[in-house]
Each structure stands twice: as structure tokens, then as C-alpha cells.
């Protein structure tokens, strides 16, 4: 290690890392928020039929249509505008684009809490994704270029990106806390629905930005070339010329494979957990306790809306608890990757350390959850009270091997694109690959789960959601296999230094 790598970070470097870490944390916070708020949001916004049934009842065709749309359309919009954001990052500078992208998704997220229709929620989620997709690219380029020493740069990128898993962990913690506190919070649209407060919490990253923004410098490497008039104009066409064509295509496909495992399987668990028998019993217990309290207070029988609110609260807390296990696993994986990135020279080898176990673990966990290993007529995991802890352990392992791969791309991509194309190249791989091809896995899982018969499922109560888990296993396996194949063709960076 040279002397520079032993030096402490300067105040400027600390500020850049702090702002990037906050941005990374709330990027994932916003993205992973949807699975936990989807059911209650559609239930409220869709309303009920004249007979009292939910218009968007979980598992219905209408529900699946909106679920697919909310998962995939914002990703497409965010990916396309994120692509433009990467270009603007190379043209206008890292700091300016990052600042406005954080403000965009924070304000849009806060406004989402006050929607009255599903289309309104969809529009605002598209704006949130746009801000998130742009922010990631600007932040990675900015952090990479603020450090000259390769080891300091690897550490900074590794540990700031680890805050993405802190953001994912916050989804579970904050949603659980909001579910508990929601009856005491100010009413929104006449109710105290936890999903609304959860969406509003997305404004948090904008608060420190207000105070830190005046002290944030531009990337010194970008600024020097810009002021000297030697900064080349970014171009999407240049990504597919010469040696960069292979880098762009393979990186995009492999990046998409990493995201596909997450959205095709892991992120669907929030839809599956409420159907677990232990969670259903906890929901019934919550209603019974509320009824006992109402009777003791002389209030009589609980109204259907209040009983539904009690069930929803118990459901939200259960989903939050499982989500925490997933994100703790992801955090462990990100930290492990940050450590190994300093020890393993070959980037291909580093990636495969996480890809190959993921290819085994993720499909097996979801195939088991769906009952794929159960004998005909046997009790499925969703109908077995004791299986919930094993589901949590399984999702911890899956999160460790999948989420860690997201940090890999933030470390790898800045080293394989030159400065004037760094934002553009990152945005193409992250947005076309991760945000569009990767999140398309959610659409595939939701669509195919309603069409594949899986005739060996014998559970009446969990059939729909067992199919969702089984389909997720298949989709995740396919995406991961593509990623492993791509890893053998992934170009190794030419040197530890960033290309000018």
C-alpha cells in the first residue's frame, strides 16, 4: 500500500462520500419500498365493488395487471431517462446532476403519499425511478473520480455502496415502525394507512442535501478537462465502437442478470409472506385482540374497515420482519465484496465468487418455498407454521449472494469506461441492463405464475403464491445462468487507474 492510501480522507472526500452514501441508501429504499406497499396501496386505491369485494383483490387478474405495471413501467421510464442522465453527467458535471436527481426522487416520493388513484401512483413512481436511475450513475462517477489512489477508491466505492443495503434494511425497519405508529400519525385522505407514510418518508435524503450542497465540489478530473477545453463530448455511438462495444454489451447483460435475480424472485417474497399460515394466524390474533379491547371499552363489534386495518397492520409487520433478514444478508454480502475487492485482482473471479453460489441458493430457496420439494399431499412450507424461520434464513443467504453483486458493478464500471464516457457507459449498463432488462424479471414472474400449472401443488390456500415462488425460482435461475456465462466474457480492466 502506498503512502497516499494510508492518508486520512480530506473534508471534501468525506462530504462526497457522505452524500453518495445517503443517495445509495435511499436509491434502494425507494426501489424496495414497492413490494411491501403494493398490496395495501392497491387495496385502498382500487376500492370495493357494490358487493364489498376488493376491486384489486390479491391474486386477481386486475391486481396482477397493476402489479406488473407498477413493477415494470417505472423501470422502463427510469431506465430511459436514466440513460439521458448519464449523458448529462458527462456533459454538465457529476455534482449538478446528482443534486437535482436526489431532489427529484425525494419530492416525487413524498407526493406519492397523497395519491387518490393508481394512475397517479404510477406517474409518481416513474418520476421516483427517474431520479434514482440518474443518481446512481452520477454518484458512482463522482466518488470514483474524487480519489487518485486505487485502494482508497475501491474502499470508498465499496463502503458507500454498502449503504444501499442499509437503505434496504431501513425498508423493513421503517415499515415496521410506521405500521406500529400509524394510528397515532396525522390522517391522510381520512385514514392512517402505513403505506402512505412509507412513501412520504422518501423525502428524507433531500434534508441533508440542503445543508451539504454548498460544500460539495465538482469531480476534479472532470472539471480540469472541462476548464482546459480537452473534455470530449459524450456519445452513445462511441459505446459501440472499437473495443468498447464488447465491454458495453457484456456489462449490460451481466448487470441485468444481477438485477433479474432480485426482481424475479427475492422482491416477490413480500407478496408471498402474507399467505404464510403463521402470518395469517397473527393477523387473526391482532383482530381478536382489538375486538377484546373494543368489547372492554363498550364499543361492540369491530367494523369491517377497522378489522381490516388490524389485519393490515399485522401483515405489514410480518413483511417488514422478513425484509430485514434479506437486507441484513445483503449488507453482509456488500461488506464482504468490499473486503474481497482489495484482495482479488481478477474482476471476473471476484464476481463469480457471488454468482455461482447465487445460481444454486436462490432457485433452491424459492423452489422449496413454493413446495417444489414436497411430496404429493404433503404440507407445503406456506402451510407449515415452523417454516417461517427457515424462509428468513433462506432469504438471508439469497440476499447475501445477490445484493452483493450490485456493489460489484459500481466498482467495476468506472474502470472500463474513459472519463468522457464514464457516466454514459454506466448509465447504459445500469439502466438498459439493470433497470429495464433486470426488472423485467418481475414482469416475467408475475405473468408466468398465472399461466404455468404446477400440478403438484396440493394446497388450496397458498396455491397462487406457491406458484409465484416456483416461477420466481425458474426466472432467477435463468437470469443467474446468463450472468455466469457473461462473466467468462467480461473484459478485465486494463489497470487499477481510471481511464482518462
Image: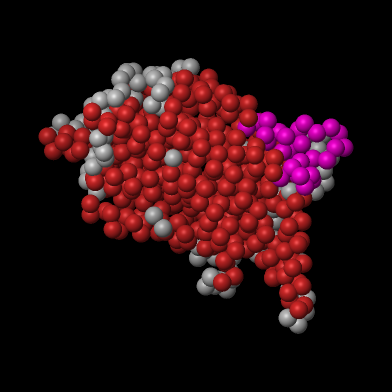
Residue 8 appears in the figure: yes
Give whichever of 425, 274 is nearer the camera: 274
Q: Residue furthest bottom?
A: 298
Q: Position of residue 389 (x, y in %)?
A: 69, 44
Q: Is residue 353 above or below residue 124?
A: above
Quadrant of the image for the N terminus?
Answer: top left
Q: Position of residue 483 (x, y in %)?
A: 52, 25
| Residue 380 within the magenta-colored segment of the rendering | yes
Give whichever of 441, 298 is nearer the camera: 298
Q: Is residue 456 above or below residue 212?
A: above
Q: Is residue 112 above or below residue 354?
A: below
Residue drawn where x is 31% and y is 50% of the image: 99
Q: Which residues are magenta?
A: 362-388
Residue drawn where x is 73% and y is 57% of the image: 282
465 vs 358, left or right, is right
Q: Is residue 488 above or below residue 308?
A: above
Q: Residue furthest right?
A: 377
347 vs 96, left or right, is right
Q: Position of residue 177 (x, y in %)?
A: 56, 60
Q: Residue furthest left?
A: 228
Q: Position of residue 63 (x, y in %)?
A: 66, 52
| Residue 376 within the magenta-colored segment of the rendering | yes
Quadrant of the image for the C terminus?
Answer: top left
468 vs 359, left or right, is right
Residue drawn where x is 68% and y is 48% of the image: 273
- What scheme was used to colour the molecule? secondary structure
Q: How many marks?
A: 0
Residue drawn where x is 74% and y is 42% of the image: 387
Amino acid at each position: 500500500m502506498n503512502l497516499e492510501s494510508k492518508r486520512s480522507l480530506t473534508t471534501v472526500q468525506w462530504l462526497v462520500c457522505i452524500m453518495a452514501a445517503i443517495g445509495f441508501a435511499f436509491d434502494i429504499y425507494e426501489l424496495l419500498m414497492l413490494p411491501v406497499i403494493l398490496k395495501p396501496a392497491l387495496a385502498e386505491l382500487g376500492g370495493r365493488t357494490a358487493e364489498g369485494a376488493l376491486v384489486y383483490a390479491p391474486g386477481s387478474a386486475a391486481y396482477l395487471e397493476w402489479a406488473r405495471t407498477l413493477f415494470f413501467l417505472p423501470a422502463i421510464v427510469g431506465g430511459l431517462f436514466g440513460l439521458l442522465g448519464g449523458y448529462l453527467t458527462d456533459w454538465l458535471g457529476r455534482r449538478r446532476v446528482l443534486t437535482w436527481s436526489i431532489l427529484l426522487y425525494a419530492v416525487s416520493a413524498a407526493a406519492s403519499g397523497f395519491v387518490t388513484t393508481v394512475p397517479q401512483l404510477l406517474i409518481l413512481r416513474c418520476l421516483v425511478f427517474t431520479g434514482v436511475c440518474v443518481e446512481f450513475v452520477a454518484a458512482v462517477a463522482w466518488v470514483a473520480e474524487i480519489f487518485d489512489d486505487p485502494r482508497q477508491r475501491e474502499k470508498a466505492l465499496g463502503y458507500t455502496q454498502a449503504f444501499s443495503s442499509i437503505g434496504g434494511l431501513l425498508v423493513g425497519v421503517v415499515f415496521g415502525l410506521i405500521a406500529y405508529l400509524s394510528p397515532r400519525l396525522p390522517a391522510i385522505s381520512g385514514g392512517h394507512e402505513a403505506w402512505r407514510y412509507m412513501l412520504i418518508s422518501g423525502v428524507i435524503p433531500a434534508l441533508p442535501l440542503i445543508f451539504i450542497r454548498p460544500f460539495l465540489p465538482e469531480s476534479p478530473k472532470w472539471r480540469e478537462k472541462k476548464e482546459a477545453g480537452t473534455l470530449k463530448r459524450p456519445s452513445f455511438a462511441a459505446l459501440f465502437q472499437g473495443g468498447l462495444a464488447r465491454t458495453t454489451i457484456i456489462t449490460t447483460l451481466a448487470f441485468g442478470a444481477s438485477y433479474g435475480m432480485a426482481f424475479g424472485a427475492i422482491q416477490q417474497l413480500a407478496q408471498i409472506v402474507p399467505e404464510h399460515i403463521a402470518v395469517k394466524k397473527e393477523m387473526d390474533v391482532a383482530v381478536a385482540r382489538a375486538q377484546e379491547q373494543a368489547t372492554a371499552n363498550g364499543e361492540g363489534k369491530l367494523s369491517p374497515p377497522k378489522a381490516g386495518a388490524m389485519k393490515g397492520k399485522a401483515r405489514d409487520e410480518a413483511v417488514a420482519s422478513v425484509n430485514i433478514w434479506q437486507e441484513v444478508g445483503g449488507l453482509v454480502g456488500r461488506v464482504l465484496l468490499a473486503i474481497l475487492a482489495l484482495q482479488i485482482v481478477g474482476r471476473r473471479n471476484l464476481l463469480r465468487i457471488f454468482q455461482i453460489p447465487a445460481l444454486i441458493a436462490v432457485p433452491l430457496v424459492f423452489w422449496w418455498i413454493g413446495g417444489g420439494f414436497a411430496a404429493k399431499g404433503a404440507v407445503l412450507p406456506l402451510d407449515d407454521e415452523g417454516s417461517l424461520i427457515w424462509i428468513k434464513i433462506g432469504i438471508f443467504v439469497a440476499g447475501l449472494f445477490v445484493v452483493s453483486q450490485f456493489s460489484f458493478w459500481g466498482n467495476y464500471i468506472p474502470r472500463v469506461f474513459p472519463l468522457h464516457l464514464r457516466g454514459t457507459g454506466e448509465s447504459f449498463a445500469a439502466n438498459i441492463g439493470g433497470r429495464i432488462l433486470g426488472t423485467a424479471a418481475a414482469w416475467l414472474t408475475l405473468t408466468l405464475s398465472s399461466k404455468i400449472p404446477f400440478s403438484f401443488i396440493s394446497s388450496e390456500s397458498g396455491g397462487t403464491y406457491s406458484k409465484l415462488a416456483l416461477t420466481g425460482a425458474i426466472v432467477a435461475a435463468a437470469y443467474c445462468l446468463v450472468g455466469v456465462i457473461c462473466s467468462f466474457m467480461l473484459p478485465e480492466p486494463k489497470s487499477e487507474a481510471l481511464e482518462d
